[in-house]
Image (cartoon, rainbow, N blue to C red):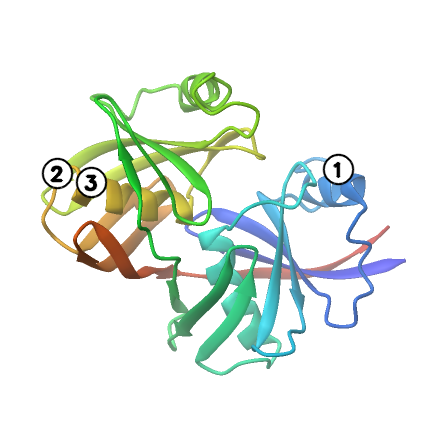
Amino acid sequence: MQLTFYKYQGTGNDFVMIDNRTEFFPKNNTKLIEKLCDRRFGVGADGLILLENHPQYDFKMVYYNSDGNESSMCGNGGRCLVAFAKQMGVIENKAEFEAVDGYHFATIDKNGIVALQMKDVDTVNQQENYTFLNTGSPHHVQIVDDLESLDVKSEGAKIRYSNLYGNAGSNVNFVHQLENDIFAVRTYERGVEDETLSCGTGVTAVAIAMHQTGKTNNNIIDLNVEGGKLKVQFDVNNGKYSNVFLIGPATFVFEGRINL
């Protein structure tokens, strides 16, 4: 079988996109998904995303990590899927879709900037040395002094596999404050089991955590990731975060075909 795929990236977080509206793709074939995401023997990506039909919304998002397993919400992947849906003619400049964590709304402008509404956050677990919250995926947020020289893969893995989060584990974000409303972020992603150049749910978690812990009073926050720049904005009322939007570029890289 010959598979047509599309490659997208959002601030360096890259994805294999497949139009699965005819439901031809073998979704339970973990090894195939892992191979497609392999950077040496496949296309190469942090994850694989299927665009599928939905009875109520514009489309459905099905997301797999590069290890081949279906995963929790991916913010950058969601933004890239919106751009892909536009390329496929499914939407024009607005989208409503369902992902693993429920309903999402998004807009895309003429420059390919996607604003994706993330889930509301009602609970932020603030500890002495870190903050934990779920923004569609679980995230550990920790401030560090020397972000540039940090071994993110090693230090992130220690936290991800620690007793703190059990078998499920957590994504891990290391943060350094640059200005009042600007933060540098590096993320270790579970499922990828390595540092990625960007993590959408991660920077969303960082923005909310930095506001919740008093590092900033702003509700529009800039996040510098290894692959570029993202923005998160939100409304907050009594510690409850709503109208949370992840904003940034979603870029088409190339289209290709691979024999399976």
Residue 32 in which image quadrant: top right
Left or right of 256, for residue 237? left
Write down the residue under mark 2: 215
Which residue is drawn at the image coordinates 28% and 60% (left, top)? 242
Q: Position of residue 162 (x, y in %)?
A: 47, 17
Which residue is drawn at the image coordinates 9% and 49% (left, top)? 217
Q: Looking at numbered disc 3 in the image, what kind of residue is underneath it?
A: Met
Marks 1,2: beta carbons within 8 A: no
Which residue is drawn at the image coordinates 70% and 41% (left, top)? 68
Write down the residue under mark 1: 41
Write down the residue under mark 3: 210
Q: Position of residue 70 (x, y in %)?
A: 65, 46
Q: Looking at numbered disc 2 in the image, what kind of residue is underneath it?
A: Lys
Please rate how many residues cluster around mark 3, counting C-alpha atoms within 10 Å: few if below 14, some from 14 to 19, many from 20.
Answer: many
Q: Nearer the viewer, residue 149 or 144?
A: 144
Placement of the N terminus among the 4 image quadrants: bottom right
Residue 174 in which image quadrant: top left
Q: Looking at numbered disc 1 in the image, what kind of residue is underneath it?
A: Phe
Q: Earlier in the sequence, mark 1 or mark 2?
A: 1
Q: Nearer the viewer, residue 228 or 106?
A: 106
Q: Helix or strand or loop: what does disc 2 sit on?
A: loop
Please rate how many residues cluster around mark 1, counting C-alpha atoms within 10 Å: few if below 14, some from 14 to 19, many from 20.
Answer: few
Marks 3,2: beta carbons within 8 A: yes
Q: Position of residue 52 (x, y in %)?
A: 67, 68
Which numbered mark, 3 or 1, is in the foreground of this view? 3
Q: CA distance from mark 3 to mark 2?
A: 5 Å
Relative to 162, residue 197 above or below = below
Q: Helix or strand or loop: what does disc 1 sit on?
A: loop
